[in-house]
Image (cartoon, rainbow, N blue to C red):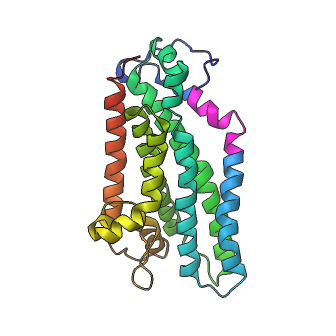
């Protein structure tokens, strides 16, 4: 958060006290800087170049292209999300910005909620919607028919849900831990080690977000693939579980931050 932003007098009460000012400052870190178009350029390029060679350079069918899209749209932006969010709370506590902001008439809940909303919107636009739109055009133009737009939008919603799992997890860990190593290490280990966990405990595929993006080869499609193709997924439980985790991570972050001492 930029401490040079001018705080304006508002009449918000309760947990919303100061939310408008905080949200304006957090949104500014995305939309009043180069961050939004840099992130957009990176993820439009990464996601679409990753699937371009498969779509245009071979005889890949639509499901295979969608499988690649689900993989790259979920796993790689997750790295950026973790890196961005690992500093959202800890960085401001270390710099004294959090203490300075909270000395003003703002609530601690609003402090966390403003970060959650701003980063969620930033991720939605730059890492989900815009890369997804280009991927939709690319896959539809390369195929015989256009993908169903409503199904694809629903698939984008699940891509965003996958990303929100790691966004809220990292935000929560930033409240719970004082060292960046834990805040960045735990989500990264989970992002790239989930397959091993599921191999050891198969029931975890219904709890963790892995099956949203990655199916079982020659057996089942990922949830995102199934939704985009208009098919029933192997199970809706991963969607329900991940959505529940997002709510729990957010609630824990808010609850614990309200008890922080500065």
Number of residue marks: 0
Q: Quadrant of the C terminus?
A: top left
Residue 12: x %, y % from top left:
42, 18
Q: Quadrant of the N terminus?
A: top right
Question: Can residue 164 be seen in the rendering of this structure?
Answer: no
Residue 79: x %, y % from top left:
55, 52
Question: Can residue 224 be seen in the rendering of this structure?
Answer: yes
Q: Start and end of the magenta stretch? A: 25-37
Question: Closest to the observer: 125 or 10?
Answer: 125
**Which quadrant of the structure image shows residue 58?**
bottom right
Residue at 64% from the left image edge and 75% from the top image edge: 140
Residue at 31% from the left image edge and 57% from the top image edge: 241
Q: Main secondary structure of the magenta part?
A: helix
Residue at 43% from the left image edge and 74% from the top image edge: 215
Residue at 53% from the left image edge and 80% from the top image edge: 63
Specify whether 250 is left or right of 127.
left
Residue 61: x %, y % from top left:
59, 85
Q: Does residue 26 show up magenta in the picture?
A: yes
Specify whether 79 is left or right of 162.
right
**Which quadrant of the structure image shows residue 158?**
bottom left
**Which quadrant of the structure image shows residue 221?**
bottom left
Q: Does residue 79 show up magenta in the picture?
A: no
Q: Look at the picture and state if 213 lies above or below 218.
A: above
Q: Look at the picture and state if 114 lies above or below 183.
A: above
């Amino acid at each position: 958060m930029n401490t040079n932003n001018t705080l304006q007098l508002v009449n918000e009460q309760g947990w919303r006290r100061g939310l408008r000012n905080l949200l304006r400052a957090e949104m500014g870190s995305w939309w009043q800087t180069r961050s939004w178009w840099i992130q957009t350029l990176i993820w439009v390029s990464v996601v679409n170049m990753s699937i371009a060679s498969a779509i245009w350079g071979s005889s890949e069918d639509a499901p295979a292209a969608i499988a690649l899209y689900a993989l790259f749209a979920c796993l790689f932006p997750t790295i950026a999300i973790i890196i961005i969010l690992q500093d959202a709370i800890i960085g401001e506590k270390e710099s004294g910005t959090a203490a300075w902001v909270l000395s003003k008439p703002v609530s601690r809940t609003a402090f966390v909620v403003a970060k959650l909303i701003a980063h969620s919107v930033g991720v939605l636009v730059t890492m989900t919607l815009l890369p997804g739109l280009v991927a939709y055009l690319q896959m539809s133009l390369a195929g015989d028919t256009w993908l169903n737009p409503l199904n694809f939008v629903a698939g984008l919603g699940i891509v965003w849900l996958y990303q929100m799992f790691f966004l809220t997890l990292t935000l929560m860990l930033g409240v719970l831990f004082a060292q960046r190593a834990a805040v960045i290490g735990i989500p990264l280990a989970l992002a790239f080690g989930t397959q091993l966990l599921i191999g050891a405990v198969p029931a975890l595929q219904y709890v963790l977000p892995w099956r949203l993006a990655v199916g079982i080869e020659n057996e089942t499609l990922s949830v995102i693939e199934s939704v985009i193709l208009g098919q029933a997924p192997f199970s809706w439980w991963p969607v329900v579980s991940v959505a529940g985790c997002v709510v729990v991570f957010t609630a824990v972050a808010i609850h614990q931050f309200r008890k922080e001492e500065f």
